[in-house]
Image (spheres, rainbow, N blue to C red):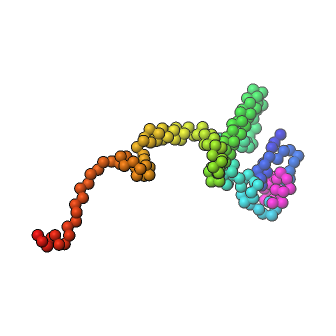
Amino acid sequence: MRLEKCWFCSSTIYPGHGIQYVRNDAKIFRFCRSKCHKNFKMKRNPRKVKWTKAYRRLHGKDMTQDSTFEFERKRNRPERYDRNVTENTLKAIKKIDKVRVDREHRHHTKRLTFSSLYCCNICDLDQLLTCFEKMDRMKPKKAQLRREAEKELEQSISMVKAPAAQQQDPSLTLPIKVKVSKPETVENRMEE
């Protein structure tokens, strides 16, 4: 069973479905439904139509680069049938699909956390912190650096004092004595 991709929206076309359009130069375009076919005939660019996968990938809404996409590519070379190879391939397909779904989920949660930074309310602070914890799990190096910075700040927090606290308690300031001389008046200079 050969599964094709729609030329316009990149969705899967199953056998017996969709429309096939052959241009004068013998180039074949396959469409999943009449909506895609009509948009193609209207000469619309799939990268500018919001519901297509090309648009979503171009604007960072879907993953663009991932090693699991390599397995989805169409290969037109014949392979000799071997039962063991087929069995292992089917097992691998399930694992690869699970990995791809997990990576897509991580990609979407990461996008949601960044968008929530721009439009978050104080009541959503707990939810935002849980999103940050998820992000920390994704990038352990950054999480470790963040924890080290927090620890260092907690250790040396006594060295940092607010200006209002220094005004209330003058003992917090450093004891520096400066000798101030009185300016001489003009009359004192003339007398000497």
25 to 65, vertically: above or below: below
Foreground of the two, 166 or 187: 187
Foreground of the two, 83 or 98: 98
Start-end of magenta stretch: 21-39
43 to 11, vertically: above or below: below
* Image label count: 0
Q: Residue furthest left?
A: 192
Identity of the residue drawn at 78% across and 27% down: 83
70 part of magenta stretch: no
Q: Give residue 70's position: percent from left, percent from top.
A: 68, 42
Which quarter of the image is occupied by the N terminus?
top right
Horizontal side of residue 56 vs 31, given as left or right: left
Horizontal side of residue 58 vs 142, given as left or right: right
Q: Give residue 25's position: percent from left, percent from top.
A: 78, 59
Q: Give residue 7's position: percent from left, percent from top.
A: 77, 53
Foreground of the two, 87 or 149: 149
Which quarter of the image is occupied by the C terminus?
bottom left
Location of residue 91 by image quarter: top right
Q: Does residue 94 appear anywhere in the picture?
A: yes
Identity of the residue drawn at 63% across and 49% down: 122
Identity of the residue drawn at 20% across and 70% down: 185
Q: Give residue 92's position: percent from left, percent from top.
A: 72, 32
Horizontal side of residue 146 vs 159, given as left or right: right
Horizontal side of residue 115 vs 166, given as left or right: right
Foreground of the two, 160 or 66: 160
189 to 127, vertically: above or below: below
Q: Residue furthest right?
A: 16
Location of residue 93 by image quarter: top right
Q: Does residue 131 appear anywhere in the picture?
A: no
Q: Residue furthest top?
A: 84
Identity of the residue drawn at 20% across and 67% down: 184
